[in-house]
Image (tube, rainbow, N blue to C red):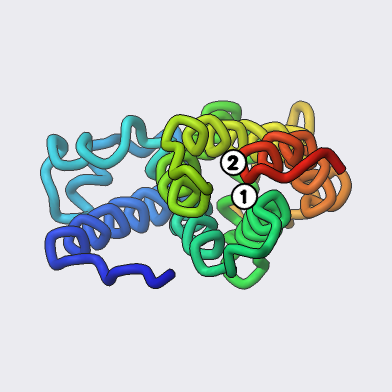
Amino acid sequence: MTTARPGLRERKKQATRQALSDAAVRLALERGPDQVRVDDIAEAAGVSPRTYNNYFRSREHAIVSAVLAGREDGIATAVAAHPSDHRLADVVTEAVVEQFTDASDQHPQLMVMITTRAPLREAFLESTIDVESPLSAALAARLPDRAADTARVLASSVAAAVRVALEGWIRPVAGEEPARGAAVSSLVVPVGALADRLRAALSVLAPAFDAAEGIGPR
């Protein structure tokens, strides 16, 4: 299955969203996230606050989007690209693990802020819901009866499983606030391998995926 290239309108929207996210991160790193206003982010990105509100519901979501941006589409694209004779539960699991454990685009300083500040941490976890919509479409295209409702339920469950895995993996250091330039290891404590946590959380959904494909119990 091939993925159509986004049209001009969609590419402009993506560029605006990226500009807002970049501005939010830059300002948060320079000033600290508590000193950044929505108006500041909009001005830095060259758009109005009203336009900003079309893309993000809070400054925290704009900041954390730099870490999560593109992962939801990456998962859906990977699922759509796999041959239909591959077990769907395995395809989805590996797509999620690949997207959430890719070390090539990590933001260490940003992860310090996310881990040590509750509003950012919660926005980071809330953003896992963005996995649902593109994954639902990819799953519906693969299911034997094109069951849209089943695809939505499965995609929603995947998003919930990802959140559970991330909640268990990220641990803030009690009583510490990040100092500018502080070492990541002193403030962020990942508990266990994230890939293992993701696979464990998603394994609970394997019977549901098998049933949707018409595969008997294993």
Residue lying at 50% horizontally and 38% vertically, measured from the top left: 151
- Viewer-proximal residue, 129 or 149? 149
At a point 20% along the width and 45% down the height, the residue shown is 42
Element carrying mark 2: helix
- The one of 203 and 117 positioned closer to us in this rendering: 203
- Residue 22 drawn at (x, y percent): 36, 58
Disc count in the image? 2
How far apart are the two marked residues, 2 and 1, measured between alpha carbons? Answer: 5 Å
Mark 2 sits on what residue?
Answer: 114
> Whole-percent x and y of residue 12?
17, 62
What amino acid type should be assigned to the residue bearing mark 1?
Met
Corner quadrant of residue 212: top right
Quadrant where the C terminus lies? top right
Whether residue 59 is situated above or below residue 144 in the rendered picture: above
User: Which of the 4 image quadrants contains residue 124?
Assistant: top right
Q: Is residue 188 left or right of residue 129?
A: right
Q: Quadrant of the N terminus?
A: bottom left
Label 1: state its secondary structure.
helix
Q: Which mark is residue 111?
A: 1
Residue 180 horizontal/vertical position (percent) = 59, 51
**Circles 2, 1 touching at the beta carbon (< 8 Å):** yes
Q: Quadrant of residue 107?
A: bottom right
Horizontal relation, residue 120 to residue 17: left or right: right
What amino acid is found at the position of numbered circle 2 in the picture?
Ile
Q: Position of residue 39 (x, y in %)?
A: 21, 38
Q: Residue 89, which numbered label?
A: none
Q: Is residue 122 visible?
A: yes
Q: Residue at x 48, y 39 (%)?
A: 132
Q: Residue at x 75, y 41 (%)?
A: 206
Question: Seen in the image, is 125 located left or right of residue 20?
Answer: right
Q: Is residue 187 visible?
A: no
Task: Count residues near mark 2 (Cα–Cα under 10 Å), then give few for <14, some for 14-19, many for 20+.
Answer: many
